[in-house]
Amino acid sequence: LQESESENKLDGETASDSESKSEFSGSSPVPTSDDTPEVLNRALSNLSSRWKNWWVRGILTLAMITFFFIIIYLGPMVLMTIVMCVQIKCFHEIITIGYNVYHSYDLPWFRTLSWYFLLCVNYFFYGETVTDYFFTLVQREEPLRILSKYHRFISFALYLTGFCMFVLSLVKKHYRLQFYMFGWTHVTLLIVVTQSHLIIHNLFEGMIWFIVPISCVICNDIMAYMFGFFFGRTPLIKLSPKKTWEGFIGGFFSTVLFGLLLSYVMSGYRCFTCPVEFNNDTNSFTVDCEPSELFQLQEYNIPVVLQSVVGWKTVRMYPFQIHSIALSTFASLIGPFGGFFASGFKRAFKIKDFANTIPGHGGIMDRFDCQYLMATFVNVYIASFIRGPNPSKLIQQFLTLRPDQQLHIFNTLKAHLVDKGILGSLEDA
Amino acid sequence: EADLEERLHELDLRSDSDIPDVPPPTDSTPEILKRALSGLSARWKNWWIRGILSLAMISGFFLIIYLGSFMLMLLVLSIQVKCYHEIITIGYRVYHSYDLPWFRSLSWYFLLCVNYFFYGETVADYFATFVQRREQLQFLIRYHRFISFALYLTGFCMFVLSLVKKHYRLQFYMFAWTHVTLLITVTQSHLVIQNLFEGMIWFLVPISSVICNDITAYIFGFFFGRTPLIKLSPKKTWEGFIGGFFSTVVFGFIFSYFLAQHQYFVCPVEYNSETNRFVTECEPSELFQMKKYSVPPLLQAVLGWETVNMYPFQMHSFALSTFASLIGPFGGFFASGFKRAFKIKDFADTIPGHGGIMDRFDCQYLMATFVHVYITSFIRGPNPSKLLKQLLILQPEQQLSVYKTLKSHLVEKGILQPSLRG
């Protein structure tokens, strides 16, 4: 609240950001509250402030990475829950910023409506996902079956209720504010909720599609920072003065290498490469399958250029590693734009960090800003290049058609299979 | 001092002030009308202008329906582009952001991207046979999502690169404004087109119900209006609301009765690749075949009939008209609130007496989504041709396993006779 008071004075200055003040010193006298746990504070009390910051960041980074590994170990269900929690926290952080910007704490209904919309959109997305992956479970339970059959209608009705409540809550003096918050809520939902669901879709495809992209982005963050720290000279973009071209390029090459190595290690394990499936009998998630050809070692000829460098003529690689190059490249080249977008956002609304959740790092959003575009990219990549449509989903849709439509499709499919020689015309398969 | 105060005022978002932000709308009535009506008083003149323009719009609507599905699609697209333009222009005025670098181009670029994505997803399904024949189109369809995403990303990166030091906040506001506008206008227009492909009746009846509700609520309010409905729109009254509701339901009933008899309105729109035209010819589904319904005892006394011949579709029209009358107005209230929030009288001056295109279409938004959700939930299942297309993209082993599952299912249901020869 203190910060918003000082921002109040700043707002009056000009519609655009003032250039005369240096970034966040002087004008905004209130520093972010120090969240560091007492333990760390005491342990590092005799170091200088700069090193202390370094240590705090370093320790927290290690803590987060360890936490990440633990969750992976615990399995898909825990991962999904964590993704959901992160999503809710990110939504909360951005909405809180909106409240601060618009001083709209006392708007009637608005807090309730924001959370209600979050619930609606999540209900819609989870319903669609659950229907696809838990198909047999859903068909067994009668209430679930009805909920799933009329899912879109129910979601729409829920959203409409929220919409009508918003219209009824419009208060004479606060129209503009309310519309701003409405817009703010919807854009936040668009960013936060869709991304988290795409991440879960990627997760169901196989844990490797979840772990490798996220690790590449983290690696790029860290490597670009290190390269920038040691070799950084040429600034990259006015928006983030600390980023340098040396960091950018160094980060790119390190991330590609890291991606190749990580994929090599992970492709060997079924628990990472198999699609997550829900086993109806044991009522738990299983990752057990025949690894697809993406995860089977193949011989590749090394291009002549590299042969002299590396000294081998052929190399055994997983095809997935080739895809990992695409993923790492995206993480290094385009991912940072997500970071620049968040930096611009923070400058536009004159905040240093999204929140104070993680000591030394800021809020959850600060850690996840580069991940957004990555999640969408991986999902689009998988849909376009890796897998086709989901066969069980197609069967499910088939079963809802009319008999004459079913027969027509069946005959067309049969003719196609016979044509391709997959099905012998005289065989009863 | 006054300058600083004015700027303080701009940013004082805590309360709406009374100072108008935009100049009053210019009078764009054509000269002809002005001369013809010059003798009347201002109030009657306004009435006449509105009336004539309403008739003109309705006639234009009928003309386009006569011209066919393709023209309708073009019309929907033009309206979408115009609505988008109107809302974006309001955004420019609110934020005084005419001279933001790149922003105009970026807004239009995003509109193009999102339209490309939607048209590729939906329209491509309907033109399956047309697409199969051409190689380049095949490639575009297969990697459609990737291409759309790449196009969008380019716009996103351009936005980030265009951020200018003094204008961060403005640029972010316009970015968000653009996205919310896209969400509203483009998704709705695509749902309208999908409804259209389902059968022209699914396009005509909802839109007519909303228009009818507008007009009859206004008329009932004019003659009988007493109790105000909502503070947001002081001209609306409960009498108008309820009168409009009953009139719209009756209108929907009667209108559906007439439309359901013609194949032109009832059949799904299909693209015939041989003649390169849209055709609407089919065996009318059971929704559009007369059935006998028993009149409930309550109404028997009133109407004097025991059974009545109706189309099942008329039952659905009941749901559509109810939605148009009860929830549709909320779209109108939303637009009214929006206009008050940004202190504008109309969205634009395109139609004399009526305002902009958005003013006419504000109640239609929710309607389009509702009809689409209604159709997918209660009327039809998934689209068979889309399903077939996806089946054909599967890997051969997947196709084989799907084939086996389907076969066993069909045999089980007795739809397919098990035979010794495949």
Image (spheres, coloured by chain):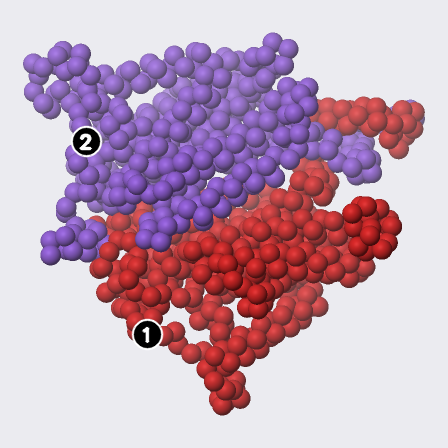
The residue at 27%/25% (across/down) is B350
Looking at the rendered structure, the kind of residue marked 2 is: Pro
**Residue depicted at 28% across the width and 29% down the height:** B356
Residues behind callouts 2 and 1 on a single chain? no
Q: Position of residue A9 (x, y in %)?
A: 23, 65
Drawn side of residue B331 relative to residue A385, left or right: left
Question: Residue at image x 39%, y 19%?
Answer: B254
Image: A289 above or below B352: below
Q: Residues within 10 Å of mark 2 (few under 14, many from 20)?
A: few
Q: In this orientation, does residue B286 appear?
A: yes
Looking at this view, name the residue that lies furthest to the top. B275
Where does the image place residue B408, in percent across and percent down from the top left?
81, 35
Q: For the residues carrying marks 2 and 1, which lies nearer the camera in this image?
A: 1
Residue B25 shows which numbered tag? Answer: 2
Is residue A13 rendered to the left or right of residue A237? left
Whether residues under marks 2 and 1 lie with C-beta atoms below 8 angstroms apart, the answer is: no
Which chain is home to disc 2? Answer: B
Calculate the distance from the C-alpha at mark 2 to the C-alpha at mark 1: 46 Å
Tell which chain the image draws in purple: B
Image quadrant containing the N terminus of chain B: bottom left
Quick one: A81 or A223, which is closer to the camera? Answer: A223
* Element under disc 1: loop
Task: Provide the residue designation for mark 1.
Answer: A30
Q: Amino acid at mark 1?
A: Val
